[in-house]
Amino acid sequence: AKRRALKKTRLVPGFLVRYADDFVIITDSRIHAEFWKTTLKEFLETEMKLTLSKEKTLITDVRKKHANFLGYEFKVVKGKGEHGYITRTQPDRKRLKQKVDSITRDIKKIPRETSREKLIDEINRINSRIRGVIQYYQCCTWVSVSMDKYARKVQLAASRRLKQYKGKWIRAKDTQNLPRVHQNYRQKIPSIQYRDIYIGITSLTFCNWQETRGKNPK
């Protein structure tokens, strides 16, 4: 009802989404997008003595191309939404690759010879990084698809490094670390034996989309 009422006015629709100094303005046409870009440029120059970056200020039709914001890619595709479209979100592919490459390098830096206790500390640190990536991106509708592309790379690096410690591929549910996560998966992960238990390097595939709820700015 509110949107229908606004359409009867001469107001230009625009929804500002902001986080710190990063923001996007969502509107319904390229003409309106150009209007907001010009208005914003004039406001920043006149009121705040700031210059709008030409390189970073882009107009994107998200039906044709994804838009990047806060490390995420946003696009709309045909689906069973109210207007025939649904939102598809996924991690920024460049940023995700950088994060995965960094984790892989950390795995390769695990000492070839160290105590089991220090090795477990290294595994816990790497698992913390893997879970951190998953938790940051689990609000994306395509989080599983995105993580699947890189999971094998991380697991192979982990397998090669843990091989130095007689590592084995063990079902995640049979390991004794990250129980709340691993108990739900039968997939095998690179693991080491410590006394009578197994400690494994978790997988990027252990993720599911988590719907986020809007927050009241008040």
Image (tube, helix red, strand yellow):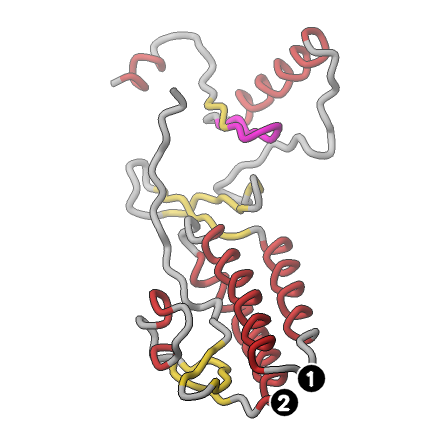
Q: Secondary structure at mark 2?
A: helix
The answer to whether 115 is drawn above or below residue 181 in the figure is below
Work out whether 46 lies above or below 195. Answer: above
Q: Position of residue 183 (x, y in %)?
A: 32, 72
Residue at (56, 92) in percent of width and height: 166
Task: Tell me which segment is drawn in magenta.
Answer: 18-26
The quadrant where residue 47 appears: top right
Please tell me which residue lies in front, 64 or 14: 14
Q: What's the residue at 32%, 19% (across, down)?
A: 3
Inspect the magenta stretch and tell me whether residue 22 lies in it. yes
Count residues near mark 2 (Cα–Cα under 10 Å), then give few for <14, some for 14-19, many for 20+. few
Q: Quadrant of the C terminus?
A: top left
Whole-Å distance between the Cαs marked 2 and 1?
A: 6 Å
When asked about the image quadrant of residue 117, the answer is bottom right
Disc assigned to residue 164: 2
Residue 6 relative to residue 151: left or right = left
Q: At which x and y percent is residue 134?
A: 47, 58
Image point (57%, 82%), residue name: 116
Please tell me how crowded label 1 is: few (under 14), some (14-19), or many (20+) other residues with Cα within 10 Å: few
Mark 1, residue position: 112
Question: Label 1 is placed on what type of residue?
Answer: Arg
Q: Earlier in the sequence, mark 2 or mark 1?
A: 1
Q: Nearer the viewer, residue 57 or 72?
A: 72
Per the image, label 1 sits on a secondary structure element best described as: loop
Do labels 2 and 1 touch, CB within 8 Å? Answer: yes
Amino acid type, residue under disc 2 in the picture: Gln
